[in-house]
């Protein structure tokens, strides 16, 4: 059987969204290679990966990263290269002319604009979408919050520990807000303050093809996150697509000159209006939910990138459930609503029939790697 295509996925080693992408592509017959520091990590451990390559992290500089990706592309013969995180996507987009493969993202300036959380809110308003009040963090904090402290971009040049991802957090009190803002600036980020909204967490995912067609959409509600205030999706279920929201998203992606996959996160308050709070232009953590609901975003994206002109996916099935078990268990134990035993068994029961980002009876090794890392984080991190 001929191989439909070859893909290289570049990640930092602990990204479970790239595992979903690798499995989805491999199931469709693609050859999937992974490049990560030390050629190790969650996705690299999967049996579906055909080759593993050592690529330096971006914390060491973009030149070393680009050289490593270039060599991995030569060795793997990949047709298309994907980035696992915001920093990798940005770097690949900027360095596309120096890489011997298709980079399926917009040109560098469009990536920067879409990933800039302050510019995103401005674009949302232009396109008729609602967004929370967002501003650059002032030198002197004059609010007690609570507010979300975010970086305009998720990445920075790297702190002393080599980290490049700058996480958002909810802060209350002027001292706490000022300390988080200062910490983010020390790590090379440009901090912003965003109104904290309460309500339902919603995600609208759209894949925009090279020719501007919408190749697939999926809409879901996030039922739980971990960490609770501003963390990863640990429980979610699919919803019928909101037609008005879909039109607004299409206008926004056009305004941003975006091509490829986009996950847009919203908060829906008591007034029923979704307000845009975030944009992810890459493989995202709960992507297995869409794949399980019948919208294979990784495959559609890869096919479109190499010019295969795939047909748009049918609507995602409604009511499909997702769980990230380790994160959901930590959330449950943290909340302690019904006692440790009942919370544990509730988490276990929810997992039956739900779709998971890591666990698979056909590909067990990533589950053990993930469990090891989760236990390490739980007890030492």
Image (tube, rainbow, N blue to C red):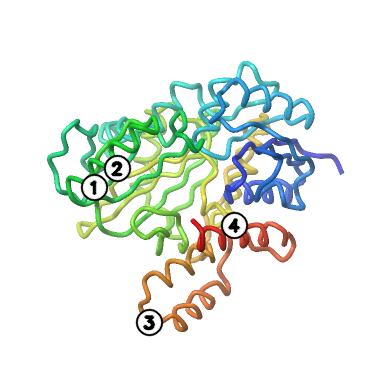
Q: CA distance from mark 3 to mark 2?
A: 33 Å
Q: Secondary structure at mark 3?
A: loop
Tell how many labels.
Answer: 4
Residue that mark 4 sits on: 373
Q: Residue at x 34, y 36 (%)?
A: 184
The crowd level at tag 2 (other Cα within 10 Å; few <14, some 14-19, many 20+) is some
User: Which residue lies most toward the left here?
Assistant: 142
Q: Secondary structure at mark 4?
A: helix
Q: CA distance from mark 4 to mark 1?
A: 29 Å
Q: Residue at x 61, y 35 (%)?
A: 82
Q: Secondary structure at mark 2?
A: helix
Q: Earlier in the sequence, mark 4 or mark 1?
A: 1
- In the displayed structure, would residue 284 be above or below residue 72? below
Q: Nearer the viewer, residue 253 or 342?
A: 342
Give residue 338's mark.
Answer: 3
Along the horizontal axis of the image, is 218 left or right of 252? right
Residue that mark 1 sits on: 176
Residue that mark 2 sits on: 180
- In the displayed structure, would residue 211 be above or below residue 48? above
Q: Secondary structure at mark 1?
A: helix
Q: Residue at x 56, y 59 (%)?
A: 376
Q: Earlier in the sequence, mark 1 or mark 3?
A: 1
Give residue 153's mark.
Answer: none
Q: Residue at x 78, y 29 (%)?
A: 77
């Amino acid at each position: 059987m001929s191989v439909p295509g070859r893909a290289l996925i570049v990640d930092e080693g602990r990204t479970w969204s790239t595992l979903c992408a690798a499995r989805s592509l491999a199931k469709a017959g693609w050859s999937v290679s992974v490049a990560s520091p030390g050629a190790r990590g969650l996705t690299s451990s999967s049996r579906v990966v055909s080759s593993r390559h050592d690529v330096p992290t971006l914390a060491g500089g973009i030149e070393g990263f680009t050289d490593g990706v270039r060599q991995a592309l030569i060795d793997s013969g990949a047709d298309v290269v994907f980035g696992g995180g915001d920093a990798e996507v940005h770097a690949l987009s900027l360095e596309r002319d120096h890489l011997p493969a298709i980079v399926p993202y917009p040109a560098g300036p469009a990536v920067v604009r879409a990933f800039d959380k302050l510019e995103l809110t401005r674009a949302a308003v232009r396109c008729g979408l609602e967004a929370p009040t967002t501003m650059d963090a002032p030198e002197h904090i004059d609010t007690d919050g609570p507010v979300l402290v975010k970086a305009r971009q998720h990445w920075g040049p790297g702190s002393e520990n080599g980290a490049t991802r700058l996480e958002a957090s909810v802060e209350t009190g002027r001292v706490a807000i000022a300390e988080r803002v200062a910490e983010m600036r020390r790590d090379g980020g440009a901090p912003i303050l965003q109104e904290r909204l309460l309500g339902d967490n919603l995600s609208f995912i759209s894949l925009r093809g090279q020719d501007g067609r919408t190749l697939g959409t999926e809409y879901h509600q996030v039922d739980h996150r971990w960490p609770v205030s501003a963390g990863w999706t640990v429980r979610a279920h699919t919803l019928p697509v909101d037609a008005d929201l879909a039109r607004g998203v299409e206008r926004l992606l056009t305004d941003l000159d975006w091509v490829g996959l986009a996950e847009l996160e919203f908060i829906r308050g008591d007034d029923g209006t979704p307000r845009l709070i975030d944009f992810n232009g890459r493989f995202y953590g709960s992507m297995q939910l869409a794949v399980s609901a019948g919208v294979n975003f990784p495959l559609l994206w890869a096919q479109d990138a190499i010019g295969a002109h795939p047909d748009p996916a049918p609507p995602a099935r409604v009511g499909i459930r997702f769980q990230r078990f380790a994160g959901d268990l930590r959330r449950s134990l943290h909340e302690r609503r019904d006692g440790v035993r009942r919370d544990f068994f509730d988490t276990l029961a929810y997992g039956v029939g739900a779709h998971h980002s890591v666990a698979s009876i056909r590909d067990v090794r990533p589950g053990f790697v993930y469990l090891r890392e989760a236990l390490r984080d739980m007890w030492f991190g």
